[in-house]
Image (tube, rainbow, N blue to C red):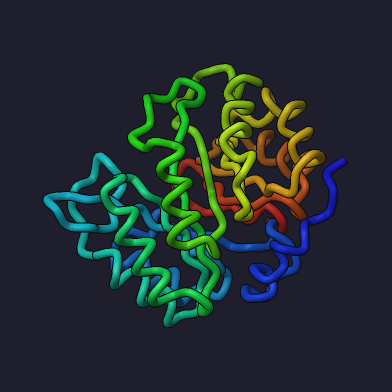
Amino acid sequence: MAIALADRWLPIMEALGVKRPGDIGWIHGANSSQALLGALSDRHVHFIEGDISVVGGEIIMAHPPVTESDLGFEKWLDLTIEAGKGAKLDFKSPEAVTHCLNYARQQALGKIPLCANADILAGPGGDKPVFKPDEFIGLCNRILPQAFLSLGWTVEEGELGYTKETVDEMLDLLVEVEAPVSLCFHAGYLRKSWARLEEILAETDYTFTIWGRIEDQGLVSWIRANTPPGRCFYDVQWKDGTQIHLTSD
């Protein structure tokens, strides 16, 4: 049985006007002006995730392999701050981390909840990550320790799931990390790995971020029945990209 949400997560819930992580509404990949403006005006969206890439020396909002965007990082964050939404900085290029964390510290700190995200380890079927785990965690801890860390694995579909060794490698990296941590797991692998993952909720004060596109209604039902909304963020979509609100649909 998962323990209750630790007190240090409560300021995030209070800032967004929700009682638990599972009640937070997400928008995934708000990387264009149109997508961002739609999210900013949607009262059901509390937290906005954007992908940060460096292309041609410029920091833009784009998810590889996309290399074009009409939206730069600073404008993206400025508009998110103005709307009072939470901002999830999903880093795709290591070169962007230092500048973006510094800008967030200068402009957003104390105004909105902040999250720094990267895939720092290879997961089920995933490629070698472009980030050095210790370096990414160290930069976040040094520049913006007030943000919660959202850490995940590179994945591809069709593999067996998160092995004990894969999960333990991440836990070893976090032994001395003081910031709140959310571990990111692809929805498609939850059932295969849940016995080990459930132990982590009981042993730590980490939250989980469950993400990915789903086409199986049975998996949606399983997630609702087995994962605790008091400890899980749900950033999942149907195959067409429509966001699934697991605690209300």
184 or 134, nearer to the observer: 134
Residue drawn at the location 62% of the way across and 73% of the way down: 16
Query: Which residue extends farthest bottom?
Result: 82
- Locate the N terminus by quadrant: top right
Residue drawn at the location 46% of the way across and 57% of the way down: 142
Q: Where is residue 81 in the image (x, y as percent from the top left)?
A: 43, 77
- Position of residue 229 relative to residue 113, above or below, is above
120 or 65, nearer to the observer: 120
Residue drawn at the location 66% of the way across and 21% of the way down: 164
Residue drawn at the location 33% of the way across and 45% of the way down: 92
Q: Can residue 60 be seen in this view?
A: yes
Left or right, 230 with reference to 161:
right
Q: Where is residue 191 in the image (x, y as percent from the top left)?
A: 69, 28
- Locate the C terminus by quadrant: bottom right
- Position of residue 116 relative to residue 154, above or below, is below
Query: Which residue extends farthest left?
Result: 56
- Position of residue 73 relative to residue 174, above or below, is below
Left or right, 1 with reference to 73:
right
Q: Position of residue 157 (x, y in %)?
A: 47, 25
Left or right, 191 with reference to 97:
right
44 or 132, nearer to the observer: 132
160 or 244, nearer to the observer: 160
- Position of residue 201 relative to residue 113, above or below, is above
Query: Which residue extends farthest right?
Result: 1
Q: Position of residue 241 (x, y in %)?
A: 45, 49
